[in-house]
Image (cartoon, rainbow, N blue to C red):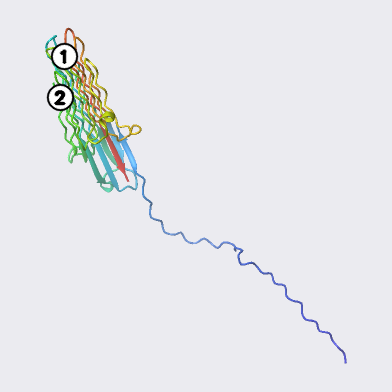
């Protein structure tokens, strides 16, 4: 009997691929739906110099806020007279009106006309009667005509012979200018809900040749300490009124509130002090009165130009 030795078969060789090895990428899938647009950044367009401009509506905005600040009125000059004859200072210019509106972007055209009013002219120096200041220009946003502009504010009244310029129209009326006097000029009125103050009244000189200081161009109500936000009056005899001040906390701010210009001081045997200029819609100060031989009164301060700011989002 023949014996055959049987051996077990050799084990098969199997290559195992670890489960954490990524296979080749599959084909690209179809494109998904477009996502919801994110919120648009606030678009700001602003104008601070008198003139005509155009606002261009930015894309993807829903609401438009428009602020129109009209220009301030110019201060009147003081009067001049012979020695020992009283001469009054001129009235300060009023601040321009302010309008602040919210509009729907969908209801506005692509381009909108913008007008920034020019500051009222200053009353020129005089060897006799006072010269009044000019009225500030209106600021607006819209086509004009009929219907009227969507945002509109009237310019501040110019200073009178002694009376301060009158408050103009607007959603928020401007502030009345300070009164001129043969004594000390009156400070302008501090008023809330405005962005610009009025000019101070000019100081004058009495028949006894006593001179008066100019009145301060006050800040809008609630704007901060009077010492930091108001232009004082000119110092007698004959001192010029300081120019208007824009709020600085800690530096000049684009939409900061502005005081009015200070009134010039009165003088005897010398020229009257010049009124301080307005700024950003504030009124100019009144010029100082003067008496004596060959003297002139002080000129009034020019009113500040208006501005328009449009914010869209």
Image coordinates for residue 27, horizontal then vertical, percent:
54, 62
Q: 251 or 65: which is nearer to us? A: 251
Q: 199 or 21: which is nearer to us? A: 199
Q: 6 or 148: which is nearer to us? A: 6
Q: 212 or 118: which is nearer to us? A: 212
Q: Quadrant of residue 229?
A: top left
Q: Quadrant of residue 6?
A: bottom right
Q: Quadrant of residue 265?
A: top left
Compared with 207, 146 (above or below) is below
Compared with 80, 114 (above or below) is below
Give the crowd class for mark 2: few <14, some 14-19, many >=20 residues within 10 Å.
many
Farthest top residue? Answer: 293
Image coordinates for residue 230, horizontal then vertical, percent:
25, 28
Compared with 172, 211 (above or below) is above
Q: Which residue is mark 1?
A: 210
Q: Earlier in the sequence, mark 1 or mark 2?
A: 2
Q: Tell whether 21 sits left or right of 138.
A: right
Q: Which residue is mark 2?
A: 179
Quadrant location, the N terminus: bottom right
The secondary element bearing badge 1 is classed as loop
Q: Which residue: 25% across, 39% down? A: 67
Structural distance between the alpha carbons of marks 1 and 2: 18 Å
């Amino acid at each position: 009997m023949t014996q055959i030795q049987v051996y077990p078969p050799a084990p098969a060789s199997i290559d195992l691929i670890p489960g954490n090895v990524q296979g080749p990428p599959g084909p690209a899938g179809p494109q998904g739906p477009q996502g919801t647009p994110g919120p648009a950044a606030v678009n700001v367009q602003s104008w601070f110099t008198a003139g005509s401009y155009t606002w261009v509506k930015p894309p993807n905005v829903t609401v438009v806020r428009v602020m129109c600040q009209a220009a301030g009125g110019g201060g009147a000059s003081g009067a001049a007279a012979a020695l020992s004859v009283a001469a009054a200072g001129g009235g300060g210019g009023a601040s321009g009106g302010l309008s602040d509106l919210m509009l729907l972007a969908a209801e506005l055209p692509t381009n909108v006309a913008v007008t920034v009013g020019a500051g009222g002219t200053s009353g020129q120096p005089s060897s006799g009667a006072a010269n009044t200041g000019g009225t500030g220009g209106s600021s607006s946003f819209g086509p004009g005509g009929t219907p009227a502009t969507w945002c509109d504010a009237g310019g501040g009244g110019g200073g009178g012979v002694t009376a301060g310029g009158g408050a103009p129209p607007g959603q928020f009326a401007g502030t009345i200018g300070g009164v001129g006097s043969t004594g000390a000029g009156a400070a302008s009125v501090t008023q809330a809900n405005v962005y610009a103050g009025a000019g101070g009244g000019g100081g004058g000189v009495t028949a006894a040749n006593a001179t008066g200081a100019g009145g301060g161009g006050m800040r809008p109500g609630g704007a901060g300490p009077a010492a930091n936000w108001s232009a004082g009056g000119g110092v007698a005899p004959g001192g010029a009124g300081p120019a208007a001040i824009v709020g600085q906390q800690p530096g000049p701010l684009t939409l900061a509130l502005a005081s009015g210009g200070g009134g010039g001081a009165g003088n005897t045997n010398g020229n009257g002090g010049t009124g301080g200029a307005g700024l950003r819609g504030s009124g100019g100060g009144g010029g100082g009165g003067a008496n004596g031989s060959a003297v002139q009164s002080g000129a009034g301060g020019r009113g500040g130009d208006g501005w328009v700011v449009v914010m869209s989002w």
